[in-house]
Image (cartoon, coloured by chain):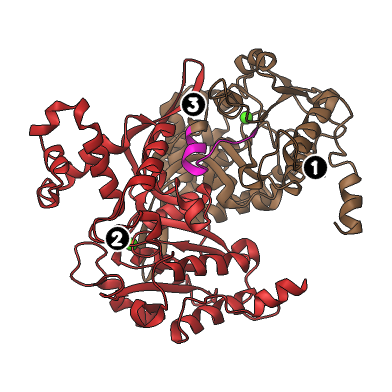
Chain colours: A brown, B red
Amino acid sequence: LTANAAIAQQADPLPSWNDGASKSAIIAFVESVTTEGSAGFVRPAERIAVFDNDGTLWAEQPVYFQGLFAIDRIKKLAPEHPEWETTEPYKSAIAGDMKGLMATGKEGLLKVIAASHANITADKFAASVREWLRTARHPQTGKPYAQMVYRPMRELLDYLRSKGFKTFIVSGGGIDFMRVFAERVYGVPPEQVIGSTIDAEFEMRDGVPTILKTGKLVLVDDNVGKPVGIYRHIGRRPIFAAGNSDGDLQMLQYTTIPRSADDKAPSFGLIVHHTDADREWAYDRDSHIGKLDKALDEAPQRGWTVVDMKADWKTVFAQ
Amino acid sequence: LTANAAIAQQADPLPSWNDGASKSAIIAFVESVTTEGSAGFVRPAERIAVFDNDGTLWAEQPVYFQGLFAIDRIKKLAPEHPEWETTEPYKSAIAGDMKGLMATGKEGLLKVIAASHANITADKFAASVREWLRTARHPQTGKPYAQMVYRPMRELLDYLRSKGFKTFIVSGGGIDFMRVFAERVYGVPPEQVIGSTIDAEFEMRDGVPTILKTGKLVLVDDNVGKPVGIYRHIGRRPIFAAGNSDGDLQMLQYTTIPRSADDKAPSFGLIVHHTDADREWAYDRDSHIGKLDKALDEAPQRGWTVVDMKADWKTVFAQ
Ligand SMILES: [Ca+2]
Ligand SMILES: [Ca+2]
């Protein structure tokens, strides 16, 4: 160890977290799995940590931000599609009528995804997300979306990485959407981002290798889909999982529940509980976005750490 | 730098490669992209290298090794399926009749995959591959399959990693099959293995989180499927690609062909040409396995390095 590294290790690795049970549990776990000779030591290659995105790493109210991107994208494309003015779900999307949009159901949602995310080259799609992140503002806070990232969670990602963890995002959101900003905003490289996936095709276009995003869903990375996404992209069991809703229940189960009576593998489950109506939003069992009900009930029995945003976090948003 | 690291850097990073154009081209490229201040410098996060597996990292004659695993697996399961004795493709598989098996075509192949790779939990499948690798022997060399890895290619993987590259396997072979041995044999962790993929489901079985492999193909990671697999799993363009057959053509194109006149991103394409009938096998344009024809024609025009196994490699197999 150099002198600087020794000082850094002694400094508080989670300065935006108030002292308390959540912070202590996180640090005790990380120390235990990374201390050679400790009974719970885990070799670096197996220090896999998985994080949900919406509501866990950045905010998700009043609607998932990717939904707002999709609506803005449809508005932008509308002049090329005059028929959208009178056809659902485009009509509601263009009008910004969320209720009308929700009323179009799953079929409407798939059409919105197709219009905003498909039949476009991968490069052009990424450019459209970059441009949106640069220019769009959150309807209530007026902030760029990339500033609505939770500072305590960014610290947690950095802390885990400093201790040899490989950090992954495992989100119901779109993989290609998140990859545009995950490296810059979270320090998570694209190859460690897992999300809902629509298929792609390869072709040479005028001599240029081109990936075209098609509309077919090949992974819905939510609920039971999260362990499937982890299996498909990572191929081994994580030892740390963080989520905020029932969509993360199976990921938390997959990470933390022993496979047999002999299975003493250490693991950590974390749930971000939105309890802070002043600094963020307060919601759980009855929310239409980020509903947290079954996973909250299961937490005590499984030993998952439920983070009380209001009590546990000194600061909510990154600056 | 410590004294040991300095000595290691000066030592030959590719001792199993004969001096010549192939070895020089590899080392010159790696030095160029990793030397700060060099015009071709690439930051570590973007040093992505992709390797085909069969015929590139280990042998593939007389049949893809995974095919031999599938046949052995069907033989092992046959007592539980008496009807297989009289039904194709199982009948030919049990008899070890490769010609008969090939005659069953794509439909037969899918049935073989289903019988040997699907309707099984992920853990049990991995155990069946581990057991096979421990006990099975190659029909011609009598070696365990994990000893039929190319030593020069293992050195190349190690060399790239020592220079800050992240090495991936991108293979037409099955992702779950390769993940069982890729970490031990190649130093490639499971999350960096990409391959043909059948779907999976998650369920709680008697309170235990369980991944079940189902039969549905969700990625055929060959030909045009390789850039798709790279896009899906890595999400950025590699700078180094190595293959041995026309199945790698699109991966080589995707890695090395400029996207525009302004695109000066450095890249390296490598083709392993099987030219050594004494120490391994010699085959290319007319082979039923690992056919190398179009990619060989395209190599000079694209500047890809064609490795002549007989001339370029001092040693073929790892010990
Ligand atoms: Ca969430
Ligand atoms: Ca091959």
Residue A104, label in figure: none
Taking the magenta stretch, the answer to whether it contains residue A39 is no
In the rendered image, the vertical position of residue A94 relative to residue B245, given as above or below: above
A307 or A180, which is in the foreground?
A307
Q: What residue type is labelled 2?
A: Glu
Q: Would you identify the image quadrant in which residue A241 lies?
A: top right
- Ligand 1 position by quadrant: top right
Q: What residue type is labelled 1?
A: Ala
Label 2 lies in ligand 2 vicinity (Cβ under 8 Å): yes
| Residue A293 visible, this angle | yes
Q: Name the residue under label 3.
A: A224
Q: Is the C terminus of chain A in the top left, top right, bottom left or bottom right quadrant?
A: top right
| Residue A278 visible, this angle | no
Q: Mark 1 points at which residue?
A: A318
Q: Give the range drawn in magenta.
A: A228-240
Residue B274 drawn at (x, y percent): 30, 73
**Is disc 1 placed on a helix, strand or loop?**
loop
Q: Is residue A76 left or right of residue B242?
A: right
Residue A142 drawn at (x, y percent): 76, 39
Q: Name the residue under label 2.
A: B60
Q: Residue at x 45, y 87 (%)?
A: B20
First in residue order: circle 3 vs circle 1? 3
**Is disc 2 placed on a helix, strand or loop?**
loop
Q: Would you identify the image quadrant in which residue B248 lies?
A: bottom left
In the rendered image, the vertical position of residue B146 relative to residue B294, given as above or below: above
Q: Is residue B145 left or right of residue A32?
A: left
Indicate which label's residue lies in the foreground, 2 or 3.
2
Q: Residue at x 50, y 69 (%)?
A: B156
The chain containing the residue under callout 1 comes to A
Residue B3 drawn at (x, y percent): 76, 74
The chain containing the residue under callout 3 comes to A
